[in-house]
Amino acid sequence: MQPTQKLANAFRRLLAIVEEEAARNPSFAERLAEINASLPDKPASGSARRKPAVPSEPPPDVFAAYREKGEEEFRFWLRSLNLRLLKAVIKANGFDPGKVSQRWTEPDKFVELIAEQTAARLRRGSAFLTPKPLKDRGPEEA
């Protein structure tokens, strides 16, 4: 048995004895009530778990930005975003279902993940679309 488990068991036995004595001895129970009254009701703010920060603004629409800017400029634009916003984009769009990126600290890794996932999702299903007729295509598409 680990030392912490031994200590926890010892405290449990001690508390059981204190409860028994408080049930038998009213003056002891009063003294315990006085001690308990002096304890704070809530735990200190430092010991409570922090709530995740709520983003002040929704993450940008990366699909529209990719279509508008093109792949290269899209990557440069992503590099201009702060780390918190990059993480928000990944979370909002479900780009990392395995949650591998939670351990990352380098913004370039986030940029690569977002750029790859955005391009892949925009290409998804394009094989099933019918091509435009040649007369509707512009000079750069022909």
Image (cartoon, rainbow, N blue to C red):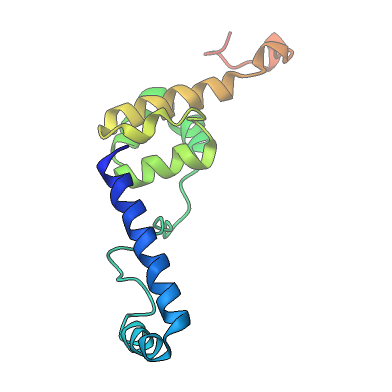
Position in image of residue 94 (x %, y %)? 53, 35
| Quarter of the view holding residue 122 | top right
- From the image, which quarter does the N terminus lie in? top left
Q: Residue at x 38, y 59 (%)?
A: 12
Q: Is residue 127 left or right of residue 114?
A: right
Is residue 138 or residue 127 the one in the foreground? 127
Position in image of residue 142 (x %, y %)? 58, 8
| Quarter of the view holding residue 111 | top left
| Quarter of the view holding residue 28 | bottom left
Is residue 36 or residue 18 the one in the foreground? 18
Position in image of residue 55 (x %, y %)? 42, 56
Q: Is residue 19 left or right of residue 130?
A: left
Seen in the picture, residue 70 relative to 53 is either above or below; the reply is above
Position in image of residue 15 (x %, y %)? 38, 66
- Asked if one can make out residue 49 in the rendered structure from this viewpoint, the answer is no
Q: Residue at x 46, y 82 (%)?
A: 24
- Asked if one can make out residue 14 in the rendered structure from this viewpoint, the answer is yes
